[in-house]
Image (cartoon, helix red, strand yellow):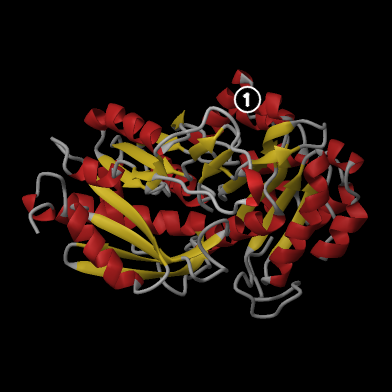
């Protein structure tokens, strides 16, 4: 098949950000397949050329007619389709693709891909293509937690596949937990960012710096905090914040992709931990601080992304606090300061390279510059959470990265893409400028 492509051809939107990018969207047999046509439509609206490929079981959950309507192409579902093979053989189709995304990826499909099976069209395309592969798992939470599934995910990650999600929440089986396929908009953002990083056709509006220093992160031990903390008032009430943990988890995934060894200390979130990371779950700021201090001696790079509560109630009531008698209004709480986790890491013996995050609502850059110096951080990442479209609970963010001798604004992008950029900047500073042995980073 000739490798000619017309930018915007066969798309709903001429000149979209993904114009000309050729994407195979694989669909396996899970209830989450009802979301896949929405993903396909978003990709075509962005200008991508999309070829849907279904497994036999996928036909039980979504029709080929629906996928053909949103993709603009006849759906492929068999190695034995003589007409399709005559027009575009499966090997040619594998060569045609710039990217393969499988959504949903069921537990069975994960197993078959991890084993290197090639007994249907979708699994064969994955083996026959050198294109990046993105997998969006979707399954019951017990299946997701099963050792066999974790083993398959590790194998696929080692093979170079990128795992997207899953999310946590109510499931079709009536249970609640990790295993929900990510929503179409989140998947679209991840697919978009992957497409834009493919040098054969894509180009970023703000290019990612290509750096040889990423190899310097291989084998380094990352300690990353993520999510909110909860400070109990009584058995049913607590003080917390809007952090979703998405940016911290995205950074953990990005650190794993450059060969880092990652320990993730997480407050309460509804996200499945990245495959390959050692995850420690905590609730309070004190618990997070204790966990950080316990892991610190073996840490090369610390990234404090968690939104840690500055204060906690001086006393947690053993029973639920009742309304005051006699119609009296108001309730007074005495708050005490929580430990400053990042300052503690920065002042520790044999300190690691220290990266902090700051959420500001005004004078973001000035406040972040001052905070970096005051707390002895090597680098700080700041975002303006006054913007309701980015930051907490959003799939996207826009940040500025500040280090000794430089700063850079990163444009609004998905949190996964920002994580890749931030890891790139950390690599540059860690290796060349602000390695822990350099006293300049703590002597300002």
Can you identify the residue that label 1 sits on?
A: 145
Which x, y percent locates residue 402? 27, 64
Residue displayed at 43% across by 47% down: 254
Residue displayed at 21% across by 68% down: 406
Q: In terms of depth relative to the viewer, which is nearer, 96 or 64?
A: 64
Residue displayed at 28% across by 31% down: 293
Which x, y percent locates residue 106? 73, 34
Residue at the outermost front position: 326
Q: In terms of depth relative to the viewer, which is nearer, 319 or 364?
A: 319
Which x, y percent locates residue 425? 30, 58
Question: Would residue 438 be seen by someone viewing this image from the given angle?
Answer: yes
Quarter assignment of residue 321: top right
Residue at the outermost top position: 147
Q: In terms of depth relative to the viewer, which is nearer, 287 or 187?
A: 287
Q: Quadrant of the N terminus?
A: bottom right
Regarding mark 1 in the picture, which secondary structure is present there? helix
Quarter assignment of residue 189: bottom right
Q: Quadrant of the C terminus?
A: bottom left
């Amino acid at each position: 098949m000739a490798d000619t492509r017309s930018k915007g051809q066969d798309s709903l939107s001429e000149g979209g950000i993904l114009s000309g990018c050729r994407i195979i969207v694989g669909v396996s047999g899970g209830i989450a397949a009802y979301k896949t046509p929405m993903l396909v439509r978003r990709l075509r609206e962005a200008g991508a050329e999309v070829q849907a490929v279904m497994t036999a079981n996928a036909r039980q959950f979504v029709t080929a007619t629906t996928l053909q309507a949103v993709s603009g192409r006849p759906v492929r579902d068999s190695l034995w389709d003589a007409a399709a093979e005559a027009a575009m053989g499966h090997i040619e189709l594998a060569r045609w693709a710039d990217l393969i995304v499988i959504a949903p990826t069921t537990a069975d499909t994960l197993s078959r891909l991890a084993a290197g099976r090639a007994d249907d069209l979708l699994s064969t395309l994955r083996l026959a293509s050198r294109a990046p592969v993105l997998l969006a798992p979707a399954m019951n939470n017990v299946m997701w937690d099963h050792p066999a599934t974790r083993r398959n995910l590790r194998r696929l990650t080692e093979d170079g596949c990128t795992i997207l999600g899953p999310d946590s929440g109510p499931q079709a089986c009536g249970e609640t937990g990790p295993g929900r396929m990510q929503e179409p908009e989140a998947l679209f953002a991840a697919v978009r960012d992957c497409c834009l990083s493919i040098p054969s056709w894509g180009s970023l509006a703000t290019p990612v710096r290509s750096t040889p220093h990423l190899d310097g992160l291989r084998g380094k031990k990352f300690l990353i905090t993520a999510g909110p903390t909860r400070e109990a008032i009584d058995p049913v009430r607590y003080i917390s914040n809007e952090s979703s943990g998405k940016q911290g988890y995205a950074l953990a995934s990005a650190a794993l992709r450059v060969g880092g060894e990652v320990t993730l200390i997480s407050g309460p979130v509804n996200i499945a931990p990245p495959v390959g990371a050692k995850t420690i779950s905590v609730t309070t700021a004190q618990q997070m601080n204790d966990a950080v201090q316990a892991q610190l001696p073996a840490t090369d790079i610390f990234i404090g992304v968690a939104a840690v509560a500055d204060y906690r109630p001086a006393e947690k009531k053993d029973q639920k606090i009742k309304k005051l008698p006699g119609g009296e209004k108001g309730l007074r709480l005495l708050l005490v300061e929580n430990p400053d986790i990042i300052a503690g890491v920065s002042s520790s013996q044999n300190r690691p390279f220290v990266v902090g995050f700051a959420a500001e609502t005004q004078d973001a850059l000035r406040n972040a510059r001052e905070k970096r110096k005051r707390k002895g951080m090597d680098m700080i990442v700041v975002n303006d959470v006054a913007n309701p479209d980015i930051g907490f609970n959003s799939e996207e963010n826009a940040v500025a990265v500040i280090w000794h001798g430089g700063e850079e604004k990163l444009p609004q992008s998905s949190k996964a893409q920002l994580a890749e950029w931030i890891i790139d900047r950390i690599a540059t500073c860690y290796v060349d400028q602000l390695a822990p042995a350099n006293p300049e980073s703590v002597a300002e």
